[in-house]
Image (cartoon, grey):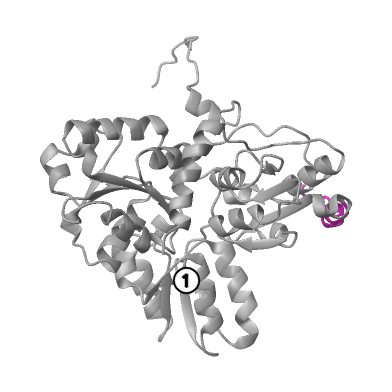
Amino acid sequence: MTTAHPVQDLDVQPTPLALLLLGRDADPRSERGVECPGDLPSPSDPDLVERARAAKEKLGEKVFVLGHHYQRDEVIQFADVTGDSFKLARDAAARPEAEYIVFCGVHFMAESADILTTDDQKVVLPDLAAGCSMADMATAEQVAECWDVLTEAGVAEQVVPVSYMNSSADIKAFTGRHGGTICTSSNAKRALEWAFDQGEPSAVKVLFLPDQHLGRNTAVRDMGMSLEDCVLYNPHKPNGGLTAEELRDAKMILWRGHCSVHGRFSVESVNDVRARIPGVNVLVHPECKHEVVAAADHVGSTEYIIKALEAAPAGSKWAIGTELNLVRRLANRFAAEDKEIVFLDKTVCFCSTMNRIDLPHLVWTLESLAEGKLVNRITVDAETEKYAKLALERMLALP
């Protein structure tokens, strides 16, 4: 028999993080969810497609819509260009006549577009809650503390930061201030080669932010380093969970961050698909775990994946380890060429934050702009932009 106890009225206040995750607070320096103002049309409205077309037509050349590869098909159909995050930011910069850049992607991508476009252009994110869990895994405060740890260990002067494009403007600015560069999944090897050329190669160390897997895979798979050359810095542990000796011995200091989509794939997924589909080619993104990359047949960025499937012979079979929206779109695109394309894992895995950009949010955004109401503008302050742009320009200068 249980005894009922009176419920106490506890004065429990939600934390700032809880409020962000609930969409009840705003933090422009965070990739996490923030409130999205405005009344959205119903997702069941049968006229949504026509409303989007009409608003986009009314705006004409004043609007330029960017669609990331991982977006839903219902959104992609209205994109003027599609691509990965950096390609889209550069495409935006190449359209100075567009007053509004509507970025159908996530927050850090819109920040990069704002950094690379003119001051007169306005970058808009249809849903402010479209963030990136990976970018959230490295905050400006955490990275500043890491630099203090490196300084105390006596190695900071040897460290060149290399930050993945999938990072906040704050982290890009930190990278620029400390003589580092940005990289994409396509040019990570070139970025690391550049970093190690910034001093005596045997002495230089790289702090790779925020995706440990891309850093590890590039160093070991593409550049011939060993796993022992890499150490993992955990921002939630004192001194990152590392000793001064471990930091002095390391060549690659990897930040403990990962992609929630690509981190789901496992060696079991690879073995299972090989058993189910004899002769299948396993093609995965370099954000996957090292053991998954080692077990795959091919490894490359989203652009690499698309080009590989375009060049694949008819009748070939492929299991793709990347976000499901893109895999499904490619499967439909190449079905007529008798190319069998399947998702690597049996578990459905969309990028949940990328999927926040849906047709109701896009319609609301375009109609608001067509009515002269600027909504959900993404801006980067001048100081942050200065150093983030410096890091991006170093990447653009890579051979």
The residue shown at (41%, 42%) is 176
* Whole-percent x, y for residue 266 in the image: 35, 63
* Residue 46 is covered by the magenta coloring: yes
Tell me the quadrant of the picture where the C terminus can be found: bottom left
Tell me the quadrant of the picture where the N terminus can be found: top left
**Residue located beneath label 1 in the image:** 320
Q: In the rendered image, is residue 127 in sight?
A: yes
Tell me the SS state at disc 1. strand
Instruction: Using the rendered view, name the quadrant where residue 218 is placed.
Output: bottom left
Say whether residue 108 is left or right of residue 288. right
Residue located farthest toward the left when viewing the structure as drawn: 245
* Residue 49 is covered by the magenta coloring: yes
Residue located farthest toward the bottom when viewing the structure as drawn: 314
Say whether residue 289 is left or right of residue 4. left
The residue shown at (73%, 45%) is 361
Label 1 neighbour load within 10 Å: few <14, some 14-19, many 20+:
many
* Whole-percent x, y for residue 32 in the image: 53, 37
Q: Amino acid at mark 1?
A: Ile
Say whether residue 53 is left or right of residue 379. right
In this picture, which residue range is highlighted in magenta? 43-54
Say whether residue 141 is left or right of residue 357. left
How many discs mark residues in the rendered view? Answer: 1
The relative height of residue 340 versus residue 43 in the rendered view (above or below) is below
The relative height of residue 184 versus residue 316 in the rendered view (above or below) is above
The residue shown at (57%, 65%) is 326
The residue shown at (50%, 20%) is 14
Q: In the rendered image, is residue 137 in sight?
A: no
* Whole-percent x, y for residue 179 in the image: 35, 43
* Whole-percent x, y for residue 169 in the image: 50, 40
Q: Nearer the viewer, residue 342 or 62?
A: 62
